[in-house]
Amino acid sequence: MREFKNTSDLDFEKLNGLIPAVVQDDKTMKVLMVGFMNREAVEKTLELGKVTFFSRSKNRLWTKGEESGNFLNLVSILQDCDEDTLLIKANPVGPVCHTGTDTCFDEINKEDDIQFLSYLQTFIDKRKQEMPEGSYTTSLFKKGTRTITQKVGEEAVETIIGAMANDDENFIYESGDLLYHLIVLLSHKGFRIEDVVRELKKRHS
């Protein structure tokens, strides 16, 4: 990963002042579109927090969504090894393509359900870092290992009871509680759900 620092690092000379910019959804990882930027477009993107291109047809700077309202809210910018291409991660507001489709490649831009676990982990990690008052997650972190592990145990028992009772609705509900508290415990111990996934992958191989 090569984090973008400033426009002086970029090589705009290869394409007569322009560089290609690949825009990727920060949550779904889908490629949304590809555009071109000049130095001013990159600087405008950083200033506005909204992805801005240089439109070759209009011959001017063009902020995506300036007419439709379907902005691309900037998350991060990465540069490639040759410093002549950008990977921009953004959160789209509405369809990205002018044809009305989610992406310019006619793909449905939908987060896989399983990806939510990673998002939830990041959210819980942020709770651990910021410790906002009134948050249930904050209260767990404050109470420490004993309380968190106790909650994992309690939710495991509730999940088992739901399964044994053939109560599918309760089984799924309690499974959700179990996963949530397990992720809190992982975060408390300095791990992530991805560490568990890597362990499972290792066993599978």
Image (cartoon, grey):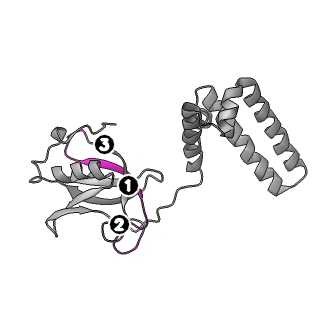
Q: Could you say which quadrant of the image residue 20 lies in?
A: bottom left
Q: Is residue 142 above or below residue 88?
A: above
Badge 1 marks a residue whose secondary structure is strand
Left or right of 128, for residue 40? left
Residue at 70% of width from left, 37% of height from top?
Answer: 181
Residue at image position (55%, 45%) is 119
Residue 15 forms part of the magenta stretch: no
Measured from the top left, where is residue 158 in percent x and y?
A: 84, 43
Give yes or no for contact between labels 1 and 3 (Cβ–Cβ under 8 Å). no
For disc 2, the neighbor class at 10 Å (few under 14, some 14 to 19, many from 20) is: some
Gap in angstroms between the C-alphas marked 3 and 2: 21 Å
- Of the two numbered discs 1 and 3 on the same chain, state the one appearing first in sequence: 1
Image coordinates for residue 170, horizontal then vertical, percent: 82, 53
Residue on which the image places disc 3: 78
Q: Nearer the viewer, mark 1 or mark 2?
A: 1
Which residue is disc 2 drawn over?
A: 104
x 14%, y 43%: residue: 11
Q: Between marks 1 and 2, how big is the CA–CA gap?
A: 17 Å
> Magenta residues, as a range?
81-101
Q: Nearer the viewer, mark 3 or mark 2?
A: 3
